[in-house]
Amino acid sequence: MARAACTSVVTALAFLPSTSLLCRNQLLFSGNSKFVGVLTLQKRCFASKVSMSLKAGIVGLPNVGKSTLFNAVVENGKAQAANFPFCTIEPNVGIVAVPDSRLQVLSKLSGSQKTVPASIEFVDIAGLVKGASQGEGLGNKFLSHIREVDSILQVVRCFEDNDIIHVNGKVDPKSDIDVINLELIFCDLDQIGKRIERLKKGKAKDSQSKNKEEAEKSALERIQEALLDGKPARSVALSDLEMEVVKHLCLLTMKPMIYVANVAENDLAEPEKNAYVEEVKGLSSDLQSGHVVVSAQVESELTELPLEERTEYLNSLGVSESGLGNLIRATYSLLGLQTYFTSGEKETRAWTIHAGMTAPQAAGVIHSDFEKGFIRAETVAYEDFVSAGSLAAAREKGLLRSEGKEYIVKEGDVMLFRFNV
C-alpha cells in the first residue's frame, strides 16, 4: 500500500502547516477525511514546502513614509515609525495575507472548516542615505538584508509636509531615486569586482565547470559595464546559462523594482494631478520597473478603523482599494505570478505560482512528491465552480476537466490532483 495511488483534493498535504514535519509513514487523507494511502519517507523527516515564499524588501530614504507604510500593511507591525533618520535599527519582517475575495466564496461553497490565503513577506530595511554603501547612516549594514528578497519596493516621497523633515532638505523624487539606486549599484559593483578577481584565478578542473566560469565572467563583465554607466543589472541581456551562473550573487539591481509613490490623502483619488507622481511614473518606465501610488498615512488610519468602516472610508476618499491591495497586485504583475486554489470540506487555500507553470509544477508548490508522482489534475475554472455551486455539481455538468502533465495552469483554477507516491 506504500505505493498506492492517492486521490486527494490536494488537501492530503496542503492542510499541514508550513512549519510541520512529515515523518515516516505519514497517513494521507482526502478532503472528507477518507483514508487514501500511506506516504513512506525513507529514513528521514523534513520540513514540507507547502507554498511559494514570496518576499519583498522595502527601501527608501529616511522620512519618506517607509516604516509608516510597513506598520500599516503588516498586522501587528513592530517597526518604529518615528521622525528620525535612523529609527529602524534592525530589519523588521512581517507576513501579510494576500487579499482575494474569491477565497471566501469558495470556502462557503465547499463548507470548508478553514480558509488559508496566500501570503507575502515584507522586509522593512533601515532608511538609507547617500554614501550608505561606504557605511554612511547605517545603510551599509542593512543592504545585505534584501539580498534574498524577490522584489524591491522603493518608497518615494511625493508629498509636502513642513512638519516632516526631508533628509536632503526638499522633496525631489528623481534625486531620491538616484541616491537609492546608486547605493544599490555601488554594492553590486563591489560584489562583482571581488567575484571577477576570484574567477580570473580559474580554479575549475573539468570542462563543464570551466564553461560555467567563463559564462559567469563574461556576464559579470557586461553587467559591470552597465552598472558603471548607471544602469541596473536587470537591463543587461543574458542567456539562460548566464542567468543561472550569476544567480548566486543575488545582485540587488537584478531584482525587479517597484517604485511606491507615497502621496498625501487628498492626492490619492487623482494622483495624475501630482507632479511628483508623474515624475516617478516616467522614471519607473525608463528604469524598466513598476510603479504604484499609495498613501501611507491613509493606510495607517485604516488600521484604526473597524473592518466594516474601512471600505466606506476609502470610498469617501474616492478610491476602492487599499494600498496593500495595490502593492500586492503590482508585485504579482511584475514577478509574473498568479493564483490557483484547492478547496474541500477541510480547507480552502490559495497557492501562488509563476504564470506558465504546468500542472505538475503547480502541484510541486504544495509538496515535491505531488510533482514527482503526478498522474493528472482535475481542474475547473473559478467562475465555473461558482456557477455550478460545488465540485460535485461541476463534475456532473461536465465542467470539471481532466488535465495531464502538459497543462498550463490558469489564473483562478480550482484544482484536484491525482498522484502516485
Image: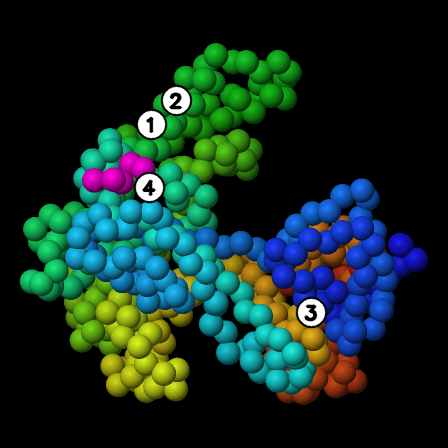
Identify the amino acid type marked 3. Answer: Met
Q: CA distance from mark 3 to mark 2?
A: 47 Å
Residue under numbered circle 4:
142
Residue under label 2:
194
Q: Which badge, 2 or 4, is on the more N-terminal residue? A: 4
**Which residue range is magenta in the image?**
137-142
As measured in the structure, the alpha-carbon distance from the residue carrying label 4 to the one carrying label 1 is: 15 Å
Q: Is disc 2 in contact with disc 1, using a CB cutoff of under 8 Å?
A: yes
Give the percent coordinates (x, y) of residue 139. 27, 40
User: How far apart are the alpha carbons under marks 3 and 4?
Assistant: 41 Å
Q: Which residue is mark 1?
A: 190
For discs 4 and 1, the disc positioned in front in the rendered view: 4
Residue 234 lies within the magenta run:
no
Q: Main secondary structure of the magenta part?
A: helix
Q: Is 329 on the left or on the right of 259, as rendered? A: right
Where is residue 15 drawn, in percent x and y? Answer: 68, 66
Q: Label 1 near label 4: C-beta < 8 Å?
A: no
Q: Is residue 29 shown above or below 185?
A: below
- Circles 3, 2 touching at the beta carbon (< 8 Å): no
| Residue at the spot 9% in from the left edge and 63% down from the top edge | 163
Q: On the rendered structure, is 48 left or right of 274?
A: right
Instruction: Select label 3 or label 4 by which is in front.
Output: 4
